[in-house]
Amino acid sequence: MSGLEGSESRPVDITPEEVQRFCEFLYRRTGMSYTQGKRYFIDRRLEDRIAATGSSSFQEYFSLLRADADHEIEHLINSFTVNETYFYREDHQLRCMTSSLLPGIAALKPPGSTIRIWSIPCSTGEEPYSIALWLMENWPEVDDYNIEIVGSDIDTQALKAAAEGIYGERALMRLSRDIVARYFGPVADGNRQIDEGLRGSIEFTRANLIDARDMARYRDFDLVFCRNVLIYFDDASRRQAAENLYDCLRPGGYICLGHSESMSRISPLFSVCRFPDAIVYQRPEADHD
Amino acid sequence: MPLVRRGAGSSGAGGEPAPQRPALDSSDPDSRWAAARALAGHSEAVPELAAALGRETVPRVREAVMTALMRIGDTASVEAILPCLRSQDAGLRAAAIESLQALPEAIAPFMPPLLGDHDSDVRLLATELARNMEASQATGLLCALIEREQHPNVCAAAIDVLMEVGTPAAIPALERCAVRFAQTPFLPFAIQVAIARLSGAEG
């Protein structure tokens, strides 16, 4: 968050009506839903952004936000979301993967066949490695299939870090000591590096979600994790990304989005699937006219 | 080891893009889908996409055609999408609104005629197109509408948009609208809420 805590400038007054307008805009633009009950949370972040943009009033800031001047929507979303990435983040989706998604996918494939899982954007690798760890720890059938995990990102520096697999304490905070001890070895500066076998088992590649030609190199995934990125795109880019992801999935394949994202608000291409642990989206098996 | 990695060269990828461009008039929906996706951003393809939009029946392909036109986003692509506002298919009308909302600059010249259309359904849908426009521009267009509009539902739709995007400059027009529709109680109430919001905007 780019707040100006400690700043001498006096926060502008924000009325309940302005908060209401703001919340409606935020919901329509991003799907993030807040009510007056979260007033303190909203005001704090709005005041920070008003100060950071040099706006003198809510109205001035709101105009700037609606025009997305200087990528203000991205700054605002960052201030409302957790930007950190760490192992086992949003683990209800990982639970859903092993309790609902993979059993369904595996039921249609003979043992020994391949299951393809894609993490995009994978940033510095926490998500694809989390998928691998979770599978090995929580899916008894893991040895019955060839599981390919691909991690992709547009940022080649992040991909380099992902391939190195070195993480600090904060990134590992959600993992048990036992898992850390079994899969991570100590390296310099108190960091830990994920086991060489795991590093070697995941393929890291560069990909741009909204570039159809780029994405055409990726096909036949059974499951895609595409979390907390579509929220940053404009409407046209979101639709383009959704169509690209549709093509990357096998018919019947699933896509997991971030907790504040909804494919239904982006594109009607996918079916909504409500499982006990998570809501995910499925590429239909066939067209319905 | 249950986790496997494909050999070098595959890059976790499937096949390369098809070398030959598929056709929008193919009998195969997958080919039409691929054709529409390949034409995204190609302004010379607008006539082809417009024709496809008029005849396409597979929702997935129609979405791709709409996205392709959105990605082009010029005057011609707006003209291609506009007829969908008069469609009997609610899904197509909604898709057209979403697409046009994403093109606030390209749609701007079309707004006065749309807001003055003889069909109240078109006028009502057109109010939504102002939602992503610059605040003063949206306020001007919607205030001009509510000053003359006779249909209460169209006014209500415009007021709903003004509530989000309007500026305090809309307040006088809203007050006059409330007087004109005094016998339609829900409108003065909606206007009261809108004025409170816009007044709040003055801080």
Image (cartoon, rainbow, N blue to C red):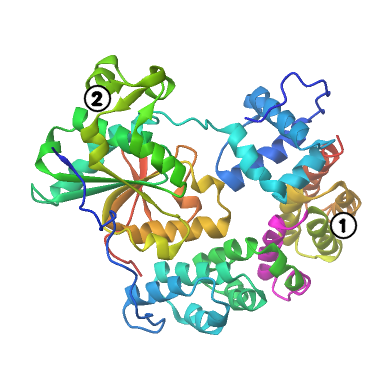
Tag 1 subunit? B
Would you identify the image quadrant in which residue A158 lies?
Answer: top left
Q: Position of residue B77 (x, y in %)?
A: 60, 75
A183 lies left or right of A233 = left
Q: Nearer the viewer, mark 1 or mark 2?
A: 2
Q: Position of residue A105 (x, y in %)?
A: 20, 48
Q: Which residues are magenta?
A: B111-134
Q: Is residue B184 above or below residue A26?
A: below
Residue matched to label 2: A183
Amino acid on which disc 1 is placed = Arg
Q: Is residue B114 magenta?
A: yes
For the C terminus of chain A, the image quarter is bottom left
Q: Which mark is residue B93?
A: none
- What residue appears at the point 83 percent right and 36 percent down from the top-left corner? A57
Q: Is residue A102 visible?
A: yes
Residue B197 can be seen, yes or no: no
> How far apart are the two marked residues, 1 and 2, measured between alpha carbons?
73 Å
Which residue is farthest top?
A: A177
Secondary structure type for disc 1: helix
Q: Chain of mark 2?
A: A
Q: Is residue A66 left or right of residue B178?
A: left
Viewer-side residue, A153 vs B174 = A153
The local secondary structure at tag 2 comes to helix
Mark 1 residue crowding within 10 angstroms, few (<14) / some (14–19) / many (20+)? some
Residue at image mark 1:
B180
Name the residue rendered at 69%, 63% in the picture. B104
Q: Amino acid at mark 2?
A: Tyr
